[in-house]
Image (cartoon, rainbow, N blue to C red):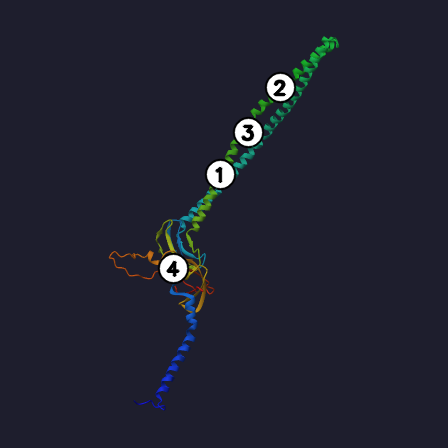
Amino acid sequence: MNEPDPADPKPRSSRRIILVLVGILLAGSIFLYPTIQYHLGHVITDDAYVSGNLVTVSTRISAKVDCMAVSTGDTVSVGDILVVLVDRPFRANLNKARAIETSSRSQLAEAQIRLEHEKHQAGPVADQYTAEWTATKARLNAAQAAYEQAERTLRRAERLSGSGLISESELETARISGQQRKAELDEASELVNKAAAGVKMTDGYLHPVRIQHQKVETAQANLTMAQSDVESARIRLLETRTFSPVRGLVAKTAVNSGELVDVGQTLAFVHDLDTLWVVANVEETLISKVQIGQHVEITIDAWPDTPLEGQVKKIGSVTGSQFAVIPRESLGGNFVKVVQRIPIRISVQDPGRMLQLGLSAVVGIDVR
């Protein structure tokens, strides 16, 4: 057998190749270590996209479309006009309601003037009879008190006369005094009845006042109704201009100029750009590592050099396949197991306002 020549260069070349390969592996390990460590501590998926609220803009009146102020794909701000409806009938209704309000206000003023006039006519007569009635009632009370006092004096005089302590003339004086007080009481009572009849008679003067009071209240109610009609007509006129409720992107316009729209009909769809989030579909084998509140790194495909940060806000309770048109169950008995994905909702910070609905993304959920 021939022994290898120590001077043969082939063994040295093999050792060099091995050393180079080991060096390459070491360098690759050092270079790939951060990536490997990142993948071990994160749940990563590229099945992610930017989502948000889709706002439906509708009308609350029935009218023809005058013109479309926006088109599909336009960016709008809060308060921008989206659709303009024909407003001529609504302006006419507003003018009519304002004219009725002016007429009602005039009728109320006229009724108030007539009320003051009736009060002025009935006031002195009513006050006079009321004052007389009050005075006669006071005189009646005084006469009643004097009569009762005279009656007590007479009874006392009769007892003393029977005992011989007073004379007959004193007893007669007490009787005459009692008769006088009784006459005064009867007179005061008659005056009260007369004054009461006078007060009752003033109802004829006060009746027009009460009627005019009712007319004033009716005119006030008519004015309130007219003011309500004006406000309603003004609101309906404003409804001929449909404004964007959010800052967003017009996803689709649902009507065209000249169309007749009805109450509640959809005019346009607007994506809300101020309430965006990222939906990431995570494999069911990794979902156990995901928890609400975990930090998320987000890379939008449109801006790969501008990473964003977010946080897990909600973990879906069902897989996406549950909403598929074709069910997973196979009636033929064949079954192919497919890894299901569960949607995760992630809040995202967008300081540069560069997010747009539907953009694809790659997310890394920190599960360490």
- Please name the residue shown 54% across and 34% down the image: 115
Amino acid on which the number 1 mark rests in the picture: Ala
* Residue closer to the observer: 109 or 299: 299
Residue 267 in view in this figure: yes
Q: Residue furthest front?
A: 1
Which image quadrant for residue 318?
bottom left
**Disc 2 marks which residue?**
189
Q: Is residue 101 positioned above or below 8 on the image? A: above
Q: CA distance from mark 1 to mark 3?
A: 23 Å
Within 10 Å of disc 2 (Cα), the crowding (few <14, some 14-19, many 20+) is some
Q: CA distance from mark 2 to mark 4?
A: 97 Å
Q: CA distance from mark 1 to mark 2?
A: 46 Å
Element type where label 2 sits in the image:
helix
Dot placed on the residue nearer the N-terminal end, 4 or 3: 3
Numbered tag placed on residue 221 in the rendering: 1
Q: Which of the two marks, 4 or 1, is nearer to us in this view?
A: 4
Asked whether the residues under the numbered discs 2 and 4 touch, taking CB atoms below 8 Å apart as contact, a structural biologist would say: no
Numbered tag placed on residue 343 in the rendering: 4
Q: CA distance from mark 2 to mark 3?
A: 26 Å
Element type where label 1 sits in the image:
helix
Q: CA distance from mark 4 to mark 3?
A: 80 Å
Q: Which of the two marks, 2 or 3, is nearer to us in this view?
A: 2
Dot placed on the residue nearer the N-terminal end, 2 or 4: 2
Amino acid on which the number 2 mark rests in the picture: Ser
Numbered tag placed on residue 206 in the rendering: 3
Q: Which of the two marks, 1 or 3, is nearer to us in this view?
A: 1
Within 10 Å of disc 3 (Cα), the crowding (few <14, some 14-19, many 20+) is some
Amino acid on which the number 3 mark rests in the picture: Leu
Within 10 Å of disc 4 (Cα), the crowding (few <14, some 14-19, many 20+) is many
Asked whether the residues under the numbered discs 1 and 2 touch, taking CB atoms below 8 Å apart as contact, a structural biologist would say: no
Q: Quadrant of the C terminus?
A: bottom left
